């Protein structure tokens, strides 16, 4: 199967799907000093 732009053939569907899931995830990094404040 080809991606929309037709430039790359997807061969590792597991990794591709996980990448799509990760695009929707957000990671927050908090500094201990900020939490105490």
Image: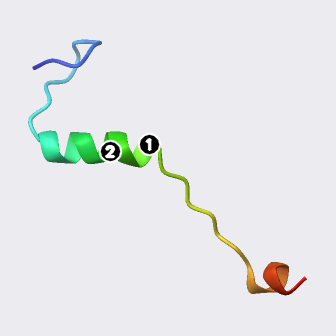
Q: How many marks?
A: 2
In which quadrant of the rendered view does residue 7 lie?
top left
In which quadrant of the rendered view does residue 2 lie?
top left
**Colouring rule applied to residues:** rainbow
| Badge 1: residue crowd in 10 Å (few <14, some 14–19, many ≥20) | few
Quarter of the picture containing the N terminus is top left
User: Which residue is the extreme one toward the top?
Assistant: 5
With respect to residue 7, does 22 lie above or below? below
Measured from the top left, where is residue 15 in percent x and y? Answer: 20, 47
**Residue in the picture at 12% in, 41% down:** 12
- Give the residue number, with chain letter if any, for mark 1: 23
Kindly state the secondary structure of the residue where label 1 is placed.
helix
Q: In the rendered structure, find residue 9 and report the number of the disc placed on it.
A: none
User: Which residue is the extreme one toward the right?
Assistant: 37
**Residue in the picture at 74% in, 79% down:** 31
Left of 11 or right of it: where is 16?
A: right
Quarter of the picture containing the C terminus is bottom right
Left of 29 or right of it: where is 3?
A: left
Measured from the top left, where is residue 36 in percent x and y? Answer: 85, 87
Left of 21 or right of it: where is 18?
A: left
How far is disc 2 from disc 1 in space, using C-alphas? 6 Å
Left of 28 or right of it: where is 23?
A: left
With respect to residue 30, does 12 lie above or below? above
Depth check: give the residue in front, 10 or 37: 37
Kindly state the secondary structure of the residue where label 2 is placed.
helix
| Badge 2: residue crowd in 10 Å (few <14, some 14–19, many ≥20) | few
- Give the residue number, with chain letter if any, for mark 2: 19
In contact (CB < 8 Å): disc 2 and disc 1: yes
């Amino acid at each position: 199967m080809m991606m929309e732009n037709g430039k790359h053939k997807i061969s590792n569907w597991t990794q591709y799907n996980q990448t799509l899931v990760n695009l929707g995830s957000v990671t927050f990094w908090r500094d201990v000093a900020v939490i105490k404040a």
